Image: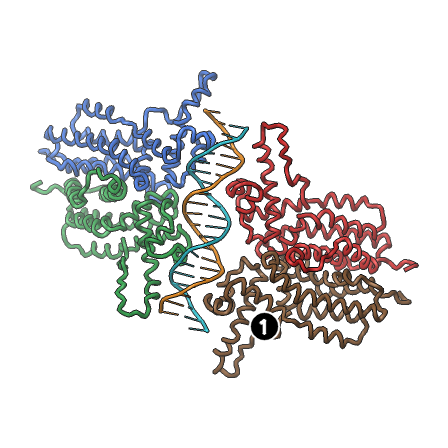
Chain colours: A blue, B green, C red, D brown, E orange, F cyan
Amino acid sequence: MPASRPLAPPDSDAEPRQRRARRKEARPGELLDAALQLFVEKGFAATRVEEVAARAGVSKGTLFLYFPSKEELFKAVVRENIAGRFPEWNEELAQFSGDSAELVRYCLHTWWERVGMTPASGITKLVMSEAGMFPEIAAFYQQEVIEPGHDLIRRILQRGMDRGEFRPLSLEYAVYSLIAPMIFLLMWKHSMAPCCPATEVIDPIGFIDNQVDLLLRGMLVPGPTA
Amino acid sequence: MPASRPLAPPDSDAEPRQRRARRKEARPGELLDAALQLFVEKGFAATRVEEVAARAGVSKGTLFLYFPSKEELFKAVVRENIAGRFPEWNEELAQFSGDSAELVRYCLHTWWERVGMTPASGITKLVMSEAGMFPEIAAFYQQEVIEPGHDLIRRILQRGMDRGEFRPLSLEYAVYSLIAPMIFLLMWKHSMAPCCPATEVIDPIGFIDNQVDLLLRGMLVPGPTA
Amino acid sequence: MPASRPLAPPDSDAEPRQRRARRKEARPGELLDAALQLFVEKGFAATRVEEVAARAGVSKGTLFLYFPSKEELFKAVVRENIAGRFPEWNEELAQFSGDSAELVRYCLHTWWERVGMTPASGITKLVMSEAGMFPEIAAFYQQEVIEPGHDLIRRILQRGMDRGEFRPLSLEYAVYSLIAPMIFLLMWKHSMAPCCPATEVIDPIGFIDNQVDLLLRGMLVPGPTA
Amino acid sequence: MPASRPLAPPDSDAEPRQRRARRKEARPGELLDAALQLFVEKGFAATRVEEVAARAGVSKGTLFLYFPSKEELFKAVVRENIAGRFPEWNEELAQFSGDSAELVRYCLHTWWERVGMTPASGITKLVMSEAGMFPEIAAFYQQEVIEPGHDLIRRILQRGMDRGEFRPLSLEYAVYSLIAPMIFLLMWKHSMAPCCPATEVIDPIGFIDNQVDLLLRGMLVPGPTA
DNA sequence: TATGAATGAGCCTTCATTCAT
DNA sequence: CATGAATGAAGGCTCATTCAT
């Protein structure tokens, strides 16, 4: 879940005077973006700080002006890219007025649009891949993303049950049932797809639609006209 | 999918004659096991060959007697652990006589018992994490594991449709629907769980049961007493 | 044939501004000099890059900033030290106006002064010693040094015959007759002399003089007063 | 100058019973031959003991049964191959009855036949190439080969002067004049020729003939019909 | 601030040497 | 005697990090 900082700052500088200053402020962000890309592509160890700096258009030394070490850069990348959008999303959820099946469908599609298909989706892959080396980061991610995410989904499911739309569900497991296909899409996109041109291409929208159909059919209280 | 090679060779020196020779045969396996553990634990780059050797009870140099480089060791770990169990599984599938819902349930549980809960499950995590650095390995995995796996599941779904048990399904997407929860379990087990004691523990059996219920409800032709 | 680059860069810091920059330009040369010395002293394999770096007053890593590998360093040493001085020598030869006997004598003495007695003479010993391991280098040397050298000598001999000073000679063999003593001096200087204090010391000037006398006596058309 | 041990032991064993025993005795010799070849080809450092053992048809361990270390193997190779043939040669010289010009020609040709063109010629190349690392060996070689060789040549020259055939010569330098072309042939054969197919091929017999003509013309007392 | 030359700890890999069989 | 599996010291090379400019 990317912060609202523009990922690619428009360099169409109306006022040429302050470009330098603006760039200076933009530095850390540009470095984080470059780092995100590279870490996702190649993993933590295989990414060289010099490459990150180069992709951000600065020198190696400059990177260390902003981040005291490669590890801290990594942590910053993760932290920066999971900046809580949950308040906003919780708000959206609270105001949703359609039926719960709609809500489920809306949620997964929205997640895809706002996270799954953006570069930010890479950080989940990143965190999972490097969790062993950065338990601290994994715990942080768990706390800041996974738990709020689970809560959000749990509320959706509860809403469905409360409104008599969903049959009684094991909240715990049902949450995973909704998350699993998203994780799957993510890993597919970031792991297999980029390196095996032979890999079958998954159409994410189609998959999500189909998956939601399947799951909802299992979750919904059977209507009189099944 | 680990070979049936015993993980810890019985050193019950019944015949004291050829201890050396016996060790020699066991070496590659011991090294591969040690490497599997460490690669899964720490990733490829962060694992030092000396550590692998030490865990296998030999010296650094010995490792290079059996594997010409760290990369080849990695490849061997992957190859060793996916040694085609598909023929055997395909056979089991062909001889299954129960209904297709049973078959689906049986399959996922069996996968968990034979792969998911064994150390070999780390391989998938490993391949996904390092795919960027080892496109060759990823392609190999794609060909040797993913495609046969998809085929197998596709046949199960087709069987269900042929026998009139499953409603018409998009084979493509339905395959992913069955795979996704397995991938999710795997990543959970190898990424979040080991480093965040705080993480909610997922009971895999429970999750699989629940997930199968949900999916089957969506896949089965609604019986007279839904 | 060493380039005219000063072997020990004058660190007489007149302008304290850009010591760093100046060093940077001097580095490759300092490293090449150090490498030349050590390679000649100990051979390629027995020379450690760290030692080369140390003798050049830098750390191991710095060496790799300028040369991508030990092999490339070696190649650079060879290239640096044979940087075509042949054009200049050919020019000298063309403008020589004395008789051909003088020219032969002048040539061999000049070779000694400009190559034989300089550290660059070690290069030939080096190339010959390591030719088996670096066929590429040997071929390069053959092309860039040996062939031009032979051409030069061949022209001298031809000049002598054209002017009626030398009797008809087999150009091919006569070239080797002039080269052989130089190679001999070189190998003596770099192989036997340095390690056997007992070895008889050859006075190169004396040897060259004597050798030229002997050869010229065989090559010259017998004058009326032999 | 190879010892009289046959370089390639004829395995056409008339009596098959003792082959094993005979081989056992032949071991050190076979190892030394293999080592000579490889050391000459690749130099000391680049030759692996395992390769030597393999070429001699034994295992690595066996080599260390006969030679306590690689360095000692090297020294043995040199020692073995310079076994004094000088007594024999000195004898030949003493009994030579022709004129001294003939003797010079005979000597150089004989040297080529008995040393230059045999594998043993490699050791001179070897000693010169590795002298820096084995000063002890170089000194030994100096003492056992170079000095006796110089003595022999010096005696020839003295004989020529004593018999009034040669003009007064600087013994010292004239010795080098005769040795230089031999050294040159040797280095050419072992260094440049094997790795540069492009290298001009020198016909050694032709070169020696030509060189002797040239030198003798310079050394001989001019006859009435110069 | 920004640079990039310099550093040196760290790791993979080789190979002479040992030793149990 | 012979073997070849095992060892571990040594050295090439990388790259995160520092610091003079």
Q: Is residue A196 visible?
A: no
Residue C181 falls in image quadrant = bottom right
- Residue B206 placement, left or right of A189: left
Disc 1 chain ID: D
Q: Position of residue D35 (x, y in %)?
A: 55, 65
Residue B226 falls in image quadrant = top left
Amino acid type at mark 1: Leu
- Residue B209 placement, left or right of A116: left
Q: Residue at x 46, y 65 (%)?
A: D60
Q: Position of residue B92 (x, y in %)?
A: 20, 56
Q: Is residue C109 visible?
A: yes
Q: Position of residue A21 (x, y in %)?
A: 44, 20
The residue most toward the right is C224
Q: Position of residue B133 (x, y in %)?
A: 39, 44
The residue most toward the left is B225
Q: D111 or C8, which lies in front?
A: C8
Residue D72 falls in image quadrant = bottom right
Look at mark 1 in the image and give the residue it sits on. Answer: D7
Mark 1 secondary-structure assignment: loop
Label 1 neighbourhood size at 10 Å, few (<14), some (14-19), many (20+)? some
